[in-house]
């Protein structure tokens, strides 16, 4: 199972330097937190406001998000995710939303991360994922 953080999913909607390598990982299916779509939409809208996305790029990104969200598997168990996130913010230097993402990944694997991948491009979250026992992708 590969759990995808929103930071990695953004690159499937907006062309970024790591988009090609992340697209290669997406073929095995995507599992993510139920709030990831909001995080991705926020990134798309922020980049549009900042002028780094044209109106055409914006429309493509929103379409890509709808298609991805229609196909991925969502972890929506708020209580169990929150419980893990409370532990994670004490154990790692994570922001709340990042702790919730990693908490959802732990729920997805029933707290047994060995042998499962965590796809993420955020440095702090990658480090926490490694310390929690996930294989963190993309490598490097």
Image: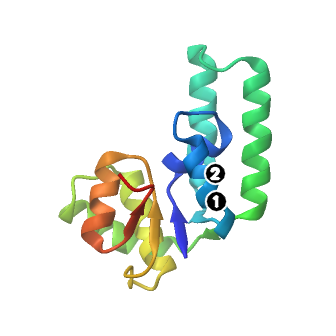
The CA span between labels 2 and 1 is: 5 Å
Q: Is residue 10 above or below residue 80?
A: above
Q: Is residue 129 above or below residue 10?
A: below
Q: Residue at x 64, y 45 (%)?
A: 12
60 lies left or right of 73: right
Percent coordinates x, y for residue 30 in the rendering: 63, 65
114 lies left or right of 25: left
Asked where in the image residue 48 lies, by quadrant, the reply is top right
Percent coordinates x, y for residue 32 in the rendering: 57, 64
Q: Is residue 28 above or below residue 6?
A: below
Labelled disc at residue 23 = 2
Would you say residue 29 is visible in this rendering? Answer: no
46 lies left or right of 109: right
The residue labelled by disc 1 is 26
Q: Residue at x 29, y 65 (%)?
A: 130
Asked where in the image residue 63 lies, by quadrant, the reply is top right
């Amino acid at each position: 199972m590969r759990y995808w953080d929103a930071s990695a999913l953004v690159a499937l909607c907006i062309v970024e330097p790591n988009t090609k390598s992340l697209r290669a990982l997406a073929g095995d299916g995507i599992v993510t937190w139920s709030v990831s779509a909001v995080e991705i939409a926020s990134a798309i809208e922020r980049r549009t406001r900042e002028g780094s996305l044209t109106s055409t790029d914006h429309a493509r990104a929103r379409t890509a998000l709808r298609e991805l969200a229609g196909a991925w598997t969502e972890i929506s168990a708020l209580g169990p995710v929150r419980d893990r996130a409370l532990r994670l913010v004490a154990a790692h230097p994570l922001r709340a939303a990042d702790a919730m993402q990693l908490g959802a990944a732990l729920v997805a694997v029933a707290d047994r991360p060995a042998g499962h991948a965590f796809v993420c491009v955020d440095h702090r979250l990658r480090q926490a994922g490694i310390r929690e026992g996930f294989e963190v992708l993309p490598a490097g």
